[in-house]
Each structure stands twice: as C-alpha cells, then as structure tokens.
DNA sequence: GTTTGTGAAATATTTCACAGCG
DNA sequence: CGCTGTGAAATATTTCACAAAC
C-alpha cells in the first residue's frame, strides 16, 4: 500500500505485474480465459506455447492475444513462444489472484446455494466465508460446513472477517438494499445475479450476470437464423480441436 | 435438420419486426435489459417512457438507447416518448420471444439443479423440458416434477420433444462431448457453463457463462484500486447506476 | 416547451502485415 | 527459419449535438 504513481511497484517473487493499472476492459475480460487455458496446458505437461496455439485454445485471434500480453508487460521469446508457468503466474498477478479473496453470498435460494457449493470458486482462490439470507427458514442451515446467518449480521461480518467481494443472489426486489449494505460496510466489488441494475457510488465495481438474458440472446440468433450465421461470442468456427492442443 | 429458410416471418400482434436480421451484437446484448425495464415500468402502470428515463433504468446512455431502438425499427413520439407496451412487444418480437423455447439442461450437479429450478427461465418464456445426466446416482431423480434422464436419451429427446436450446452444466471434461451430441441432433443454440471453449460448426450459436471468470474480473478491479485522481471522466457522480465492463 | 432520430465525431477494439529477434 | 511485438488500417461502438416533429 505504499506505492503511489507508478514508478516503483513492489515485485512479488516470480514475475508480477509492473504496470497494469488501466488495461482495456476487453483485455481484462480475456485474461481469466487465458489463465484457464494455461492451466490446462500446464497439466498436460506443456512448457511452452505459441500465441497461435494459446489463441486457438481460448477462441481469439493470435494477434490480439499477443497485443493483450504485451500490454500487460508479459513477454515471450521470439521463435519459441511463451513459457506456460511464467505467463500463468504473471497473469494471476495482474488479476490480483496472488492473495485469496474473501467472498460473501447474500441470498441462498436455489441459485445462491448452488453458488455456495460451486467448486470453481475455491479452486480459483475465492474463499466463500459468509452466507447470509433474510428468510428465517434458511438462516441456520448448514451448507458444506458454512452456516447461513441473518443478513442483519452482514455489515459486522464484512468488517470483522475481511470480506471484500459480495455476491448478490437475492430476488430483484431485495438486491438494491443488499448492495447498499455491502457498500456501506466498505465492499467495493459486487457480483450481481439479480435481474436489476444496481446504483452504487463511484469506485464500486459491479458485474452483472443474468441467466435469462443469455437465453434471450440465444433466442435472437435462433429466431434470425440465416446461412452463414453471426458470431455470438468468440468461438472457433468450423471444426477445431476444442481445448488443449 | 436445421431448417434453413424462414421465409414467412410470423406476424406478431402489434408490430412485428420487419428488418432486424443483422443488428450490432452490442445492441442485441442490451435488448433483454430494455425488455426487463419495460416490464417493470408496465407493472408500475406507466404508459409512456422517455429515452432518458428508460436509459437510466438500464444503465446506458440515452442516445445509445435511441439509436438501438431506431435500428430495430421501433419508434417513439417526439416530445412524448415511447409507448411502454408497444415497445416491449416489439422488442420481444425481435428477440423471438413470441413463441416459447424448449430447453434441455445437461449436467445436474449443484449448478444444473439450480438452473433447473431457476424461476427466471419459465417466467420469460423458456420451458425446461428435459434434464439429462450421465451419473446413475442422479438419473431418475425428480426435480420440480421433471425426471432426470440418462444422457444417452438426449438425441432422441431433442428430436421428439422439439428441444431447441441446450444448456451445458457439466464438468469441463464432458462439455465438448455433450455439445457434439446437441449439434448432431440439430440444436443450434447452446448456453455453456462449463469452463472451456467449445468447438462447434458455423451456424451454431454458443454463449458462455463462467462464474469464476466474473469473480476474477472483479479481483482485477479490487487489486488495482488506487489513485483516483488520474482520469476524471466527465460526469461527477455521487451514485451512479452501472456495471463495470 | 419536450423528446426523438440521426449524421458526424470521438473512442474502443480487432485485424492486418511485417520488421526484427532468437 | 518461426514467432513475437507493434505500428497502422479496418471495424465496431459510444457519445455528441442539433434539426425536426410533436
């Protein structure tokens, strides 16, 4: 917490980000994808990867991948490629994954319960340390060793337990109230599954995931099916070997 | 059997989309959001809405909203605004929501089960008609009145039951296989929750939702929260509605 | 008066293409 | 050689600002 400006960012052991403050949003969105693909390569025992191969594994253009990485400050070896382990560690550093985050989930209906038990979170360094709900029928329930607490205890828990990410999985009507609680207690990162737009002060990052929205976008493409369709997301066309190569 | 033609555009009650085939992807992504906000307004008894108000409710710039709508072919009344009901019907028509879609969910671990029970799907016209898994311990289980079937029966069910959207909620290792089954049986719209990139032929729309990716993007913002002086983007706001992208 | 609809400008993002390094 | 790193071109998207319509 000592650094100001940008000159002397403290270096973490194996090659952490020196500059990375204002990456393009589009680049940031792709970093987790690169990281996942690198993890798969690493498990396959691959040591080095070319931008072409890594790009194929993540469904992007290789030039874009190189540009993304160069913007991070990561670098490869010409004629060779990128070192899988080094690059993965570097990206993890940029994403701030070197220290685990502490997550609270608010709202433990079906979706919230599924999120609480989703192994992908803890696997990637997100510790779920608090579960909160307003329904007395759910409070007290134990989910994989974590007891659901009354949402009235949320603010205190955030402060006492170092929670820095809030996941809102309540009905839409309650979401803004929960967001206010989170923000007032100092949380600046919110993942919102409720179908509504949250109002938050500047400096608070909100990401929204609306499952029905995704289906509606698919519905659009289904409805306007013509030959030589459009691209919904970044996806490899034709027929390519899906994952690792 | 992917019927290529669509020759006769079906008539929607109050103003079916005549042109809407190749909208910008960014516009399509926002349509479900507009629709949701319009639904909320409608429930409040509001009859007319200005682009400024609707934009605020969806977190976008009003000029962009107007441009989106004009690209759809929807129109408002100058000096007045847009008719809530008419506009909602129009957008629903463009999205192809006038007929219900039939959805299969494959993979009924915690996430798949939560999706199967998520009320937001049926509320918005997506009928979940098939649940499939490969685990004998889950096959036969009843989830809200729908019995989980063996994934070996998937292809037949797609053809017999008119399933046109597949939701993949399996582990990553099984996802490509399931995608192949879906595509071979004629499904051209896939929502993928597995943490991997799917290879599909042209003409198949895939959207991917990776919950851990969202948290990692938040982690990035959390990690790089410093400064605050750098770029004062116009618009000093105390409390904005928005989403970090 | 208010608010839409839209060209034109401003940004952001992606792709191309190639120089230069190992 | 093969592959990275990157300017420059091509696209896509967002915002501005204002004339026209009600």
Image (tube, coloured by chain):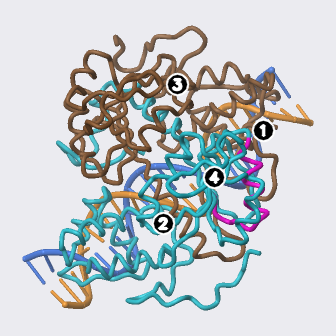
Chain colours: A brown, B cyan, C blue, D orange
User: The magenta stretch spans which residues?
Assistant: B174-190
Q: Are marks 1 and 3 on the same chain?
A: yes
Q: For the residues carrying marks 1 and 3, which lies nearer the camera in this image?
A: 3
Q: CA distance from mark 1 to mark 3?
A: 28 Å
Q: Secondary structure at mark 3?
A: helix
Do the residues under discs 3 and 4 have CB atoms within 8 angstroms? Answer: no
Q: Main secondary structure of the magenta part?
A: helix
Which of marks 2 and 4 precedes in the sequence?
A: 2
Q: CA distance from mark 3 to mark 2?
A: 33 Å
* Residue B28 badge: 2
Q: CA distance from mark 1 to mark 2?
A: 31 Å
Q: Secondary structure at mark 4?
A: strand
Q: For the residues carrying marks 1 and 4, which lies nearer the camera in this image?
A: 4
Q: Are marks 1 and 4 on the same chain?
A: no
Q: Secondary structure at mark 2?
A: helix
Q: Residues within 10 Å of mark 4 (few under 14, many from 20)?
A: many
Q: For the residues carrying marks 1 and 2, which lies nearer the camera in this image?
A: 2
């Amino acid at each position: 917490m000592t650094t100001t400006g940008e000159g002397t960012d403290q270096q973490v052991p194996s090659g952490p980000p020196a500059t990375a403050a204002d990456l393009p949003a589009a680049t940031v969105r792709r970093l987790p994808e690169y990281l996942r693909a690198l993890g798969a390569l690493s498990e396959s025992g691959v040591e080095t990867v070319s931008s072409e191969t890594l790009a194929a594994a993540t469904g992007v253009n290789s030039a874009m991948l190189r540009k993304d990485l160069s913007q991070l400050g990561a670098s490869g070896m010409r004629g060779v490629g990128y070192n899988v382990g080094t690059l993965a560690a570097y990206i993890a550093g940029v994403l701030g994954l070197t220290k685990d985050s502490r997550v609270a989930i608010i709202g433990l209906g079906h979706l919230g319960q599924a999120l609480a038990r989703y192994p992908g979170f803890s696997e990637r360094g997100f510790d779920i340390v608090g579960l909160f709900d307003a329904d007395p029928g759910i409070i007290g329930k134990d989910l994989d060793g974590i007891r659901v607490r009354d949402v009235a205890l949320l603010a205190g828990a955030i402060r006492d337990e170092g929670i820095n990410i809030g996941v809102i999985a309540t009905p839409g009507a309650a979401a803004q109230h929960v967001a206010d609680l989170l923000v007032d207690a100092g949380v600046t990162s919110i993942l919102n599954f409720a179908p509504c737009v949250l109002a938050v002060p500047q400096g608070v990052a909100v990401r929204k995931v609306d499952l029905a929205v995704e289906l509606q976008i698919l519905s659009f493409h289904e409805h306007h099916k013509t030959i030589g369709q459009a691209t919904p997301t970044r996806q490899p066309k034709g027929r390519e070997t899906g994952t690792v190569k």
